[in-house]
Amino acid sequence: MEIYKKQSISEAFKVYYDKRMIKILLLGAISGFPWVIIGSSLSLWLKEDGLSRSTIGWAGLIFAVYAFNYLWAPIIDRIRIPILTKKVGHRRGWIITMQTIILISLVCWSLISPTTNLALVISIGLIIAIASATQDITVDALRIEQIGENEGKSMQAGAAMAVVGWWTGYKLGGVVALNAAEFFQEAGFENYWQITFLVLGIIIISCNIGLLFINEPQTTNRKENQRLTDKMIEEKLGYTNIVTKIIAWLTGTVIGPVISFFKKNGFNIALAILGFVFLFKIGEAFLGRMSVIFYKEIGFTKSDIALYSKGLGWITTVIFTLLGGLFAIRSGVIKAMFVSGILMASTNLLFSLLAWYGKSELLFAIAVIFDDMAAAFATVAFVAFISMLVDRTYTATQYALLSSIGTAGRTTLAASSGALVDWLNGDWGIFFVITAVMVIPSLIFLYMIKDKLKLND
C-alpha cells in the first residue's frame, strides 16, 4: 500500500526538470515510432489497395509478437551483441541492431505491392514487429535503469516522459507518414506508400544517432545477482560440471525472473496482477485497431486524420501525460489507474456519437482530444505501475513479461476487431459502446488487490 505526502503542483512538477527525463523522452520516441509503420501506415496501405476490413484486422495479428517478447527477454538480459556491446553498451547494442533490421525491412516494403505480394508484405511486417518488440524490451530496461530503484516519484515522472516520448514517436511519426503519402499521391506517384516508407527510414537513422547521446548505467549488481542465482541452482543440482553449469544458466535465465515475481508478491496476488494487466487496455486496443479505418469510411482524408488524430492528438497527449504523471505522483498510482480506466470507458462513447451523427470535424476533434487525454492518463499510470513491480536483477525480463501480458490482451483479442465490425454490419456506434464496456473486468481485479500490492515506491 502506498503512502504519499501531498505536494503542491509546482513542487511535484520540479521532478520533470531532471535531465534524465530528456533521455527517457527519446527512448519513448524510439519505442513508439515502429507502431506507426505496422499500425496506421500498414492499415491504410492495405485499405487503399482494396483489401477488406476483416483482412486488415487479421493482419493486425502481427502485433501479437509483443505479447510473447518476454520469451526471449531473458536472452536480452544475458547475451551481449558482439562488437556493438563493447562499442556502445549492452542495452544500446541491442537497440541499434533491431533498428537496423527495421530499416532494412522498410527498404524491402518500398519494392513490393500488397495486391500482388500480400503474404510477403505481412511477413515483412511481422519481422518489423519482432524487431520492434525486441527493441522495446531493451528500451524499457534502459529507461528503468536511468532511475534509482527507490526513486518512486522520479519513476512515475519517468513513466510520464516515456509515454510522452512514445506518443511523440507514434503521433508525429504518423503526421510524417500520412502527409508524405498524400503528398506523393497528389504528385502522381502510384507507389506513394513505398516512397513514404523510405522517408520513414530516415527517421529510423535519426533515432540511432540520438540514441548515442543516452548514457547506459553500469549495473554490476545485476550481473552479480544473476551469477548468484545460477550458483544456487547449480548447488541444488548437487554436481559441478559443464552440464550442470549450462543447466543452471538456462534455468536462472528463464525461470529466475518468474520465481522472483511470484516470491515477491505471493502466488494469489501475482495471478491477480497478471489478470489486471491482461485486461486493462483491451477496449482501447479494439478502438485503436479500427479507428483509422473508421475515419476513412466516415469520409475523412489522410491529411484530416494526420491533423486531428496525429497532430492535435499529439499535443493533447503530451499535456495530459504530464498532468497524469503529476496526478499519479500526488494521488498515488493505484488511484490513477482507477481514474484512467473510467476515463477510457467514457471517452470511447464519444466515437459512438461521431458514428451516429456522421462526418463532423468538431466532433472528430472533441473525440480525439478526450480519447487521447484518457489514453495518456491510462498509459502513464500503467507504465509507472508495472515499472514499480520489477526486480532490478531481471529488469528487462520482468518488465517484458508484464508488458507483454498486457499486450496479449490488446493484440490477440483486438485482431478480431474488424470481424466484429463486419458482424455488426458496419454499425460503428455499437462497436464503440462494446469497447467502452471492456475495461470493467480489469478494474474489478485491481479493486481486489489494491491494498496488498508491494511496489518499489
Image (cartoon, helix red, strand yellow):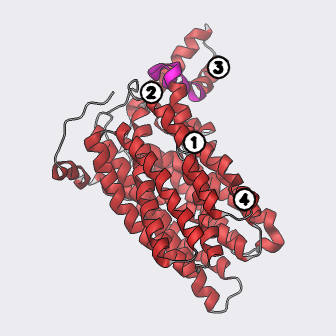
Element on which disc 2 rests: helix
Is 99 on the left-hand or right-hand side of 393?
A: right
Measure the C-alpha gap from mark 2 to mark 1.
Answer: 20 Å
Q: Identify residue for label 2.
A: 449
Q: Identify residue for label 1.
A: 404
Measure the C-alpha gap from mark 3 to mark 2.
Answer: 44 Å
Q: Identify residue for label 4.
A: 424
Q: Which residues are magenta?
A: 253-269
Measure the C-alpha gap from mark 1 to mark 3.
Answer: 33 Å
Element on which disc 4 rests: loop
> Is 50 in front, or is 33?
50
Q: CB under 8 Å between callouts 1 and 3?
A: no
Q: Which dot, 4 or 2, sits closer to the camera?
A: 4
Residue 43 position within the rendered picture, expressed as x and y whole percent measured from the top left: 66, 67
Label whose residue precedes the other's in the sequence (1 or 4): 1
Is 16 on the left-hand or right-hand side of 115?
A: left
Residue 20 position within the rendered picture, expressed as x and y whole percent measured from the top left: 30, 52
Other residues around mark 4 within 10 Å, as few (<14) / some (14–19) / many (≥20): few
Q: Amino acid at mark 2?
A: Ile
Q: Which dot, 1 or 4, sits closer to the camera?
A: 4
Element on which disc 3 rests: helix
> Is 383 in front, or is 282?
282
Q: Identify residue for label 3.
A: 242
Quarter holding the C terminus is top left
Q: Is residue 297 above or below residue 18?
A: below
Measure the C-alpha gap from mark 4 to mark 2.
Answer: 36 Å
Other residues around mark 3 within 10 Å, as few (<14) / some (14–19) / many (≥20): few
> Is 137 in front, or is 449?
449
